[in-house]
Image: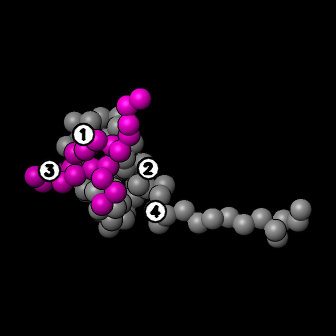
């Protein structure tokens, strides 16, 4: 096999940032940071963090709660 035969499937846009944002809530389910505080802590752009939060809400991992976000109760998993 030659190196030009390898194909890399692109991941979803901003997948790494979405993972990092979601990890913040998984580490602290009562996180009450606003977007600006979260972007400062992650060292990411405010607009990118806002878009990542929107993507996580669309995917059903987070939901908007008042002025912030919270984990959804059902993360899409199943109990055997």
- Would you call the spot at circle 3 few (<14 residues within 10 Å), some (14-19), or many (20 or more)? few
Question: Which residue in the structure is indicated by mark 2?
Answer: 19
Question: Which residue in the structure is indicated by mark 4?
Answer: 14
Query: Residue at (38%, 37%) from the top-left corner?
Result: 78
The answer to the question of whether label 2 and label 3 lie on touching residues, with beta carbons closer than 8 A, is: no
Kindly indicate the quadrant of the structure image that contains residue 39. Answer: bottom left
Rendered-image quadrant of the N terminus:
bottom right
Residue 73 is labelled as 1
Q: Which residues are magenta?
A: 58-80
Residue 65 is labelled as 3
Residue 2: % across, % down? 88, 65
Query: Residue at (41%, 29%) from the top-left corner?
Result: 80
Gap between marks 4 and 1 measured at Cα: 24 Å
| Secondary structure at numbered mark 2 | helix
Gap between marks 1 and 3 measured at Cα: 13 Å
**Could you tell which of marks 1 and 3 lies nearer the N-terminus?**
3
The answer to the question of whether label 4 and label 1 lie on touching residues, with beta carbons closer than 8 A, is: no
**Could you tell which of marks 1 and 2 lies nearer the N-terminus?**
2
């Amino acid at each position: 096999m030659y190196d030009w035969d390898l194909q890399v499937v692109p991941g979803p846009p901003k997948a790494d940032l979405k993972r990092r944002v979601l990890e913040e809530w998984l580490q602290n389910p009562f996180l009450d940071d606003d977007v600006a505080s979260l972007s400062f802590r992650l060292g990411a752009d405010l607009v990118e963090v806002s878009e990542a939060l929107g993507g996580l809400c669309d995917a059903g991992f987070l939901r908007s709660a008042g002025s912030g976000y919270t984990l959804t109760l059902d993360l899409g998993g199943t109990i055997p």
